[in-house]
Amino acid sequence: MATGFVARQSMRMRAALSVSRSASARMSTASATVAPKTLPSLSMQGKVCMVTGAARGLGYEFCRAFISSGCTSLAVVDLKEEEARSAAAELKTFAQTSGDVDPNSLNIIGIECDVSSEQNVQKAYGEIMSAFGRIDSVVASAGIVENYTAFDYPYDRIKKLYDINVHGSFFTAREAARNMIPNGGGSIVLVASMSANIVNIPQPQTPYNASKAAVKHMASSLAVEWAKEGVRVNVLSPGYMLTKLTRTILSHNQELKKTWESLTPMGKMGDPEDLAGAIVFLSSDASKFMTGSEIRVDGGYCCT
Ligand SMILES: NC(=O)c1ccc[n+]([C@@H]2O[C@H](COP(=O)([O-])OP(=O)(O)OC[C@H]3O[C@@H](n4cnc5c(N)ncnc54)[C@H](O)[C@@H]3O)[C@@H](O)[C@H]2O)c1
């Protein structure tokens, strides 16, 4: 009887061992699929990140890229509190379902802020500092575009565009640097556009193009001012990407999409996801000797 018990025990142990071996084989195959080996300096793990204009479009995609690269502390900033909070909640679900993240370590918050108001921006950073105690990577993505000819553009609308695109980027960068410098520095990415380099056709948008050229040169200038303080400032310049911003323009003019695509050497508009690698590179330590630079992601548009 004792021999039978020992034999049964040993069979159970062998069976358990083989189950655990096949489970660990499955796990290692799964982890090989889930987490391919990549450059450690590209990781956003442990970094506190903030993205403006993050409730939708490119800003939202930048948040997803950070989360996919290990970021667990994130401030999602946008004009309306409800939209910022609901985007933050969606991103939290994305984080929980897309990797081996400890739910207790996730801190993703939505913050209301009109970037064209310096007071609003300062208040937003106040909330971030009290929630996280530091800020490491900031992306200024909030921006608008409108199409009027120069003769028809009403002054109040031009002013609004510059207030958001130019002054909003400046306030966002300045408060970022003020909060980063005491902690040793950080990375700021200003989202400009290929329109900082070329003149889009056929739609007229002179103030937008000028605003993006201003953002590009603002980044170089701030980069030089803060280079010794450890704050890097770079620019990401997308080409035509399919977001709410461009869909609004295209909804009035279906032919325009074909024109844009025919003017783009790659023959298509970009998917917001196509910017994920560039934003993570610029925001992470992988670009730690890079400041005042621009990365264009435009399907080759600016080459022609
Ligand atoms: N989509 C493109 O093809 C494209 C190309 C080049 C550059 N860009 C630039 O990328 C950035 C994002 O564009 P998008 O396509 O995601 O636009 P979008 O319109 O889809 O999203 C912009 C976001 O910014 C927010 N926002 C607007 N004004 C704000 C303010 N005053 N304060 C705070 N948030 C504000 C909006 O609520 C929105 O959530 C913009 O700066 C835009 O100029 C876009």
Image (cartoon, grey):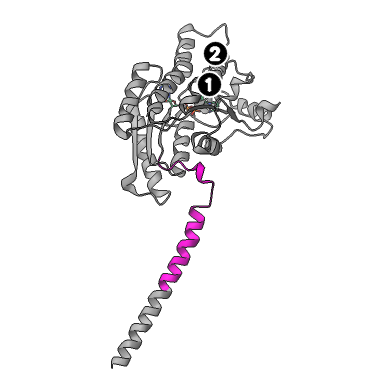
Q: Is residue 51 above or below residue 158?
A: below
- Name the element at disc 1: helix
Mark 2 or mark 1, whichever is nearer to me: 1
Q: Which residue is mark 2?
A: 207
Q: Nearer the viewer, residue 190 or 299?
A: 190
- Name the element at disc 2: helix
Q: Give how far across and how far down residue 265 sits, in percent.
A: 69, 32
On the rendered structure, is 125 left or right of 300?
A: left
Q: Is residue 21 magenta?
A: yes
Residue 82 visible in image = no
CA gap between label 2 and label 1 equals: 26 Å
Q: Which residues are magenta?
A: 19-46
Q: Give how far across and how far down residue 139 sits, in percent.
A: 46, 29
Q: Give how far across and how far down residue 185 sits, in percent.
A: 43, 30
Residue type indicated by callout 1: Val
Q: Which mark is residue 199?
A: none
Q: Main SS type for the magenta part?
A: helix
Residue 102 visible in image = yes
Q: Which residue is mark 1?
A: 224
Q: Is residue 33 magenta?
A: yes
Residue type indicated by callout 2: Pro
Q: Nearer the viewer, residue 70 or 52?
A: 70
Q: Give how far across and how far down residue 259 sits, in percent.
A: 65, 26
